[in-house]
Amino acid sequence: MKALVYHGPNDVQLDDKPRPSIQHSEDVILRVTSTALCGSDLQLYHGTVPGMEPGQTLGHEFMGVIEEAGPQVQEVKVGDKVVIPFNINCGRCWYCRHELWSQCDRSNPKGELGGSFGYTQVLGGYDGGQAEYVRVPFANTVAALKVPDSIKTDEQVLFLSDIFPTGFFGADMADVQPGDDVAVFGAGPVGYFAVMSSFLHGAARVFSIDHWPMRLNKAKDLGAEIINFDNEDPVERIKKETGGKGVICIDAVGYEAVGHSGRNNDGENSNGSNSRSKSGHDHSKVSNPAYEPANPLQVINWICQAARKYSTISIPGVYGAAYDQFPLGQLFNRELQVRLGQCPVKKYNEQLLHLIEVGRVDPTKIISHTMKLDEAPKAYEMFDKKEDSTKIVFKP
Ligand SMILES: NC(=O)c1ccc[n+]([C@@H]2O[C@H](COP(=O)([O-])OP(=O)(O)OC[C@H]3O[C@@H](n4cnc5c(N)ncnc54)[C@H](O)[C@@H]3O)[C@@H](O)[C@H]2O)c1
Ligand SMILES: [Zn+2]
Ligand SMILES: [Zn+2]
């Protein structure tokens, strides 16, 4: 079968691999009908996530039809179409019983963290769904996302595997209340669904911050007020718009944040001169921002200043242990709480599916490209540039 395989940093290829087979009694083999490319795949692609080994099939956002089922699979059957959450859940451990689905204790034989598809050895090294077929363990737990007859296209529900619940988790962790003003940093797919979910939580205004017009315009279509950080200082604009009060902040960017590096968190360039504005954005250096060196804490530093005092900062964007420096002083002084982590996808699935079913939300609007799986290596290059794509779906 065809599978999109990691060969090394910035090198993914479509390989021929043996079709997976049932290994445990609760496994199913899924024929993938649709799969998508996520910002988290880019971190793997860049080779910056520890434990990534050549040979790994990528992809953790996928859905398909059950082709084969192990003898202990009772909740779904051959022929069912299901969306698969990116976290693997046993359904029976202490964490699963408490709906802390992202930290299942039995799904990762290689370590402490919960298992995940198409990710590194640290999360179990399971082959992913950017392939024609994939083995899904503990398949009794995926029954909640059996696709109902009312759903006409894969694209309507595919993002229930990850980015829609993750964006919703962003708003939920931030405890967005009716009437709150919210800022979502990053207008990628997770940011898009965090904007949508903030409105679903009752936000009065939502600011969307990024620097790619195509992505910002998608957020604008949802009703967000957009801030292009190449043109203006996001902290100053947010403070101005909110009469100095600040906003509830969601970081939908993570450690691959671009910024204007070469300066420390106190506003000084590495040569000691202070040439940046209050928010840390150096307008004198905006040349080709897409390719400026990453500045992992850029968004965190902006958020620490733009957040409403005593609010909760929500960080669905990924930060690895290598980025363990944190502006504790600002957090303490402004009494900011922080919540972050991997989304427990199953927690939100049924209510989000219902919002789609009744037509309250249309997740398909984020899609910019639908491509054949054969084109995946090209798609990684394009999505990595971010400029001309918002979300890419593959058809194996
Ligand atoms: N917590 C979870 O369970 C979970 C699940 C899915 C994705 N994620 C993470 O969410 C993050 C976003 O995912 P995505 O698919 O939207 O990724 P993406 O890479 O497509 O989008 C990130 C966006 O952030 C923008 N950006 C970069 N620097 C910025 C800055 N300084 N200020 C504002 N915007 C900036 C980029 O231009 C880009 O549009 C990634 O870190 C991803 O790994 C986490
Ligand atoms: Zn993802
Ligand atoms: Zn479990």
Image: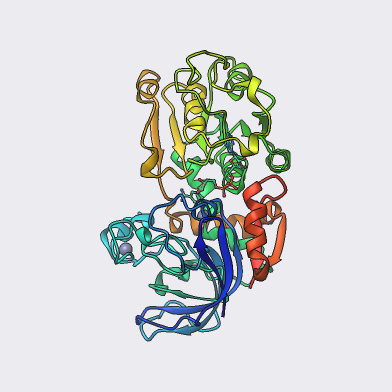
Please give the name of the residue rendered at 35% of the width and 58% of the height, measured from the top-left corner: 122
- Is residue 362 visible in this depiction of the protein? no
- Hey, which quadrant is residue 211 in on the image? top right
Please give the name of the residue rendered at 48% of the width and 62% of the height, measured from the top-left corner: 85
Q: Quadrant of the C terminus?
A: bottom right
Residue 214 vertical position relative to residue 379 in the rendered view, above or below = above
Image location of residue 329, percent across then percent down: 36, 21
Residue 258 vertical position relative to residue 153 in the rendered view, above or below = above
Residue 38 vertical position relative to residue 70 in the rendered view, above or below = above
| Left or right of 265, for residue 202 | right
Question: Ligand 3 is located in which of the four quadrants?
Answer: bottom left
Image location of residue 292, percent across then percent down: 60, 35
Please name whichever residue, 95 or 134, is drawn nearer the observer in this view of the structure.
134
Residue 294 vertical position relative to residue 371 in the rendered view, above or below = above
- Hey, which quadrant is residue 100 in on the image? bottom left
- Is residue 171 visible in this depiction of the protein? yes
Q: Quadrant of the N terminus?
A: bottom right
